[in-house]
Image (cartoon, rainbow, N blue to C red):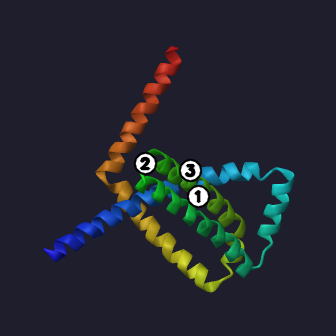
């Protein structure tokens, strides 16, 4: 009985983690590119250049602190949900996730060369990347993923036909 519960919790946790990683995978590059376009503004361009020149430990602080600063925002969103403001709380969580992913993705792009100079970071990043790629390979091999791709392709084709006929 206990083993079944542990297995169920492990699978549920794995599914949630897979969804989180899929969101990160889907959103990381487009959101990072959007912030890169914003980074063309003169003041932001100077700030990004300064960040890119940081030494490894300073780059680590610049990379980690914004992610930590979003934690109170997410906790406040959970408090809103707990106090009956479900839609507002959910909107805050989604906005924090989008903004947070964009900022962290951009900062990682800027600080990655310095971060990779830290042996422990490079080692952990290599392990994380290998684990994430194995998980994504399993997800992409699943029937749900393949079915979703078919539905997406059909929706795009339908949209193209509809646009052509308009």
Judged from the image, the secondary structure of the residue bearing numbered disc 3 is helix
- Pointer 1 residue: 101
Which is nearer the N-term, disc 1 or disc 3?
A: 3
- Pointer 3 residue: 95
Judged from the image, the secondary structure of the residue bearing numbered disc 1 is helix
62 on left or right of 131: right
On screen, residue 48 above or below 7:
above
Task: Evaluate if marks 1 and 2 touch, with contact meaning CB atoms under 8 Å apart.
Answer: no
Q: Nearer the viewer, mark 3 or mark 2?
A: 2
| Measured Cα–Cα span from mark 3 to mark 2 | 14 Å
- Pointer 2 residue: 86
Task: Evaluate if marks 1 and 3 touch, with contact meaning CB atoms under 8 Å apart.
Answer: no
Q: Residue at x 53, y 51 (%)?
A: 92
**Crowding near the residue tagged with mark 3, few <14, some 14–19, many ≥20 C-alpha atoms within 10 Å:** some
**Crowding near the residue tagged with mark 1, few <14, some 14–19, many ≥20 C-alpha atoms within 10 Å:** many
Q: Position of residue 59 (x, y in %)?
A: 72, 74
Judged from the image, the secondary structure of the residue bearing numbered disc 2 is helix
35 on left or right of 121: right
Q: Residue at x 55, y 75 (%)?
A: 125
Along the viewing direction, whichever of 128 and 23 lies nearer the viewer = 23
Which is nearer the N-term, disc 1 or disc 2?
A: 2
Q: Position of residue 48 (x, y in %)?
A: 79, 62
Count of numbered circles on the image: 3
84 on left or right of 52: left
**Crowding near the residue tagged with mark 2, few <14, some 14–19, many ≥20 C-alpha atoms within 10 Å:** some
Q: Position of residue 109 (x, y in %)?
A: 68, 64
> To which quarter of the image does residue 72 belong?
bottom right
Along the viewing direction, whichever of 15 and 5 lies nearer the viewer = 5
Q: Find residue 87 and name its label.
A: none
On screen, residue 23 above or below 125:
above
Task: Evaluate if marks 3 and 2 touch, with contact meaning CB atoms under 8 Å apart.
Answer: no
């Amino acid at each position: 009985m206990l083993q079944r519960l542990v297995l169920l919790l492990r699978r549920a946790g794995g599914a949630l983690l897979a969804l989180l990683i899929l969101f990160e995978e889907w959103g990381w590059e487009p959101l990072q590119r959007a912030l890169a376009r914003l980074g063309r503004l003169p003041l932001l361009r100077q700030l990004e250049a300064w960040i890119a020149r940081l030494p490894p430990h300073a780059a680590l602080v610049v990379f980690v602190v914004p992610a930590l600063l979003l934690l109170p925002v997410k906790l406040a969103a959970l408090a809103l949900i707990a106090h009956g403001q479900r839609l507002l709380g959910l909107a805050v969580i989604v906005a924090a996730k989008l903004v947070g992913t964009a900022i962290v993705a951009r900062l990682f792009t800027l600080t990655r060369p310095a971060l990779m100079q830290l042996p422990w970071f490079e080692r952990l990043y290599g392990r994380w990347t290998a684990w994430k790629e194995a998980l994504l390979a399993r997800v992409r091999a699943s029937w749900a993923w393949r079915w979703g791709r078919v539905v997406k392709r059909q929706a795009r084709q339908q949209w193209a036909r509809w646009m052509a006929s308009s």
